[in-house]
Image: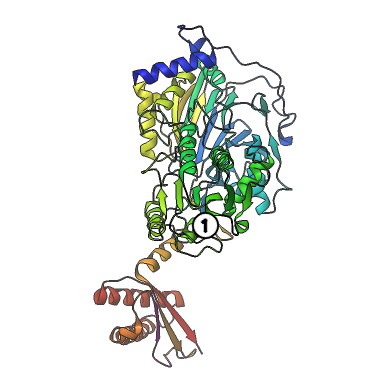
Amino acid sequence: MGDEKEKLEGWITKNIGGAAGEKIVFAAAAQPSRKPPQHGPHPAARGQNQNKKPAHGVLRVIPLGGLDEVGKNMMIFEYERDIVIVDMGFQFPEEDMLGIDYVIPDVSYLMNKLDRIRGVLITHGHLDHIGAIPYLLPKLNFPPIFSAKLTIGLVKKRLEEFHLERKARLHEIDPSKQLRLGNFLVDWFRVNHSIPDGLGIILRTPAGNIVHTGDFKFDYTPVFQQPADYAKIASLGSQNVAALFSDSTNALKPGYTMSEKKIGETLDEIIKTARGRIIIAAFSSLIGRIQQIINSAAFYGRKVFISGRSMTDNISIAQRLQFIKAPPGLVHPINKVGKTKDEDTLILTTGAQGEAMSALTRMSIGDHSQIEIKRGDTIVLSSSPIPGNERSIYTVINNLVRRGARVIFNQVMDVHTSGHAQREDLKLMINLVKPKYLVPIHGELFMRQAHAEIGRELGMPEHNTIILENGDVMEIQRGEAKKTNEKVSANYIMIDGKGIGDVGAQIIMDRQIMAENGVLIVLFTADNKTKKLIRDPEVISRGFIYMKESQEIVNETVGVSKKAYEDAIGRMPQGKRGEIKAFIRGCLDRFSHRKIERHPLILPVIVEI
């Protein structure tokens, strides 16, 4: 570790400044230029607070997502009548969220403050930071969005899918220029991540200066993206930063995050030595890695074929914005693969997480329209499993191996690296910024707790490392921060098809019951005057019992249902239909548990004729 530290200090001395052997004192870094704002405020803010003498009021910080999960990142900064939002992402569903497509933040707190929202600042273009924009932007009256070039391009594409691009106000920013949004003066600094154009944010307010890192790592040999702005980050150490909100995803991993350049070298060697077709599955947002793959393919004489919608879309956007460059005739859609020789073929595809409908999964089960896996194929999973996806990924790998392919993944070679800072990187960020308070963000509680411990290891008092949860309210005044007892709504808002927030806990519970024990439907046909049954109840079962082989249980279920209905009518002759159904459900649930120890979803249906 000593050699690594010396190497790191040498790199910083070389790239930030200082004579050989001179120790860099970050606290003495130059202050940034205080130039006039380069962008006007949101129209609602014009004329407001522009000439007002700064008051030492209270800055309220409210995370609506990203602090109890990996994903769904969204944070509110509120000073007097001005609100700035940082990120607006979604979360992929957890294992028990059956049938759910995405989870988005709960913006109930903002609904009576829409006129105060000055802008939305986006740190980078991953879906856990931009995915909720099409769902939330209309609810928030389309406040302006500010971010870097590639991020704005990805946001625009996402909005086009929802036919909202004409209503949205997207602003491409220059990270070297400040932005005034009401009482907030916004500064930016470049960071490295697994997608280009990642930004950290500096919010200068009368209550204190705030630094939000976004997702970041320190990569001293970044690939096809600009280096992190070390000089600007280092200058923050002398600017009395009240609080640092910092990425916690890899806070438990020791050392430094591996450089993307190392991954490119490994992939280049694979492309050089493989004899048959090469199929590489990766996240479609890994623009720098995709560029490295394209470069290697061109050098070794392979054509590149693209499979998967998100891969096609992201490469198209990156090419249009000059973040990916390829010689003419090198990159093609997958339907053009035709009779291209195996040794001349490289396929870039989605499906690195074993997603059920992804291109790689369909290849692995022989269900892809253009590609049939065969002996001699080399398949690379250039990713690491997202927690919960391990079983799906191993199933895909097994299926590919069964078809004769050679499969390479991170346990075999270094074909993937994280885009998030590990412990030594997190220490460096804290030491450069020198915040009074550290607020770990982006990750599960155990990750954020580990990040807080890093701050304490570096000498920060325990009460200066603040652990927040979604919906908590933190207040900063005159540079002093505290977590309040206030709590705002931060529920899971679930997206299921075109439904937004219409899937509640009861529906999820019903789906879980059906998944575990099936469904039992009992149809009662009764006289609409006497309420007496005209015929025996009819029983329909799915996922509960196989009726053809369980006739005895079916007959008993009919008998129990009939008696339960008659008892309900006898006890509640004027009872409401819902009360009668509840009584029948209780009787059938007790019978089912006693007979076969199962609790199916029971649906009594009463038809009166």
Colouring style: rainbow
User: Is residue 540 rendered magenta in the image?
Assistant: yes
- Tally the marks: 1
Classify mark 1: residues with Cα within 10 Å, few (<14), some (14-19) or many (20+).
Answer: many
Instruction: Write the residue at 49% across / 58% down.
Output: 100
Instruction: Write the residue at 63% across / 57% down.
Output: 336
Is residue 471 at all visible to an observer of this figure? Answer: no
Q: Is residue 432 above or below residue 597?
A: above
**Quarter-of-image position of residue 50:** top right
Q: In the rendered view of the protein, which quadrant contains the N terminus?
A: top left
Please give the range of residues in magenta: 534-542
Measuring from the top left, give residue 81's x and y in whole percent.
63, 33
In this image, 146 relative to 483: left or right?
Answer: right
Where disc 1 sits, the SS reads helix
Front-most of 586 and 294? 294
User: Is residue 364 rendered magenta in the image?
Assistant: no
Mark 1: amino acid: Ala
Measuring from the top left, give residue 116's x and y in whole percent.
65, 37
Q: Is residue 257 above or below residue 166?
A: above
Measuring from the top left, give residue 293's x and y in whole percent.
54, 41
Instruction: Write the residue at 37% across / 72% down.
Output: 518
Furthest-left residue in view? 594
Q: Is residue 9 above or below residue 532?
A: above
Front-most of 521 and 362? 362
> Where does label 1 land, which residue?
359
Is residue 412 at all visible to an observer of this figure? Answer: yes
In this image, 559 relative to 409: left or right?
Answer: left
Furthest-bottom residue in view? 534
Q: Is residue 378 above or below residue 179?
A: below
Front-most of 239 and 13? 13
Measuring from the top left, give residue 571's x and y in whole percent.
35, 81
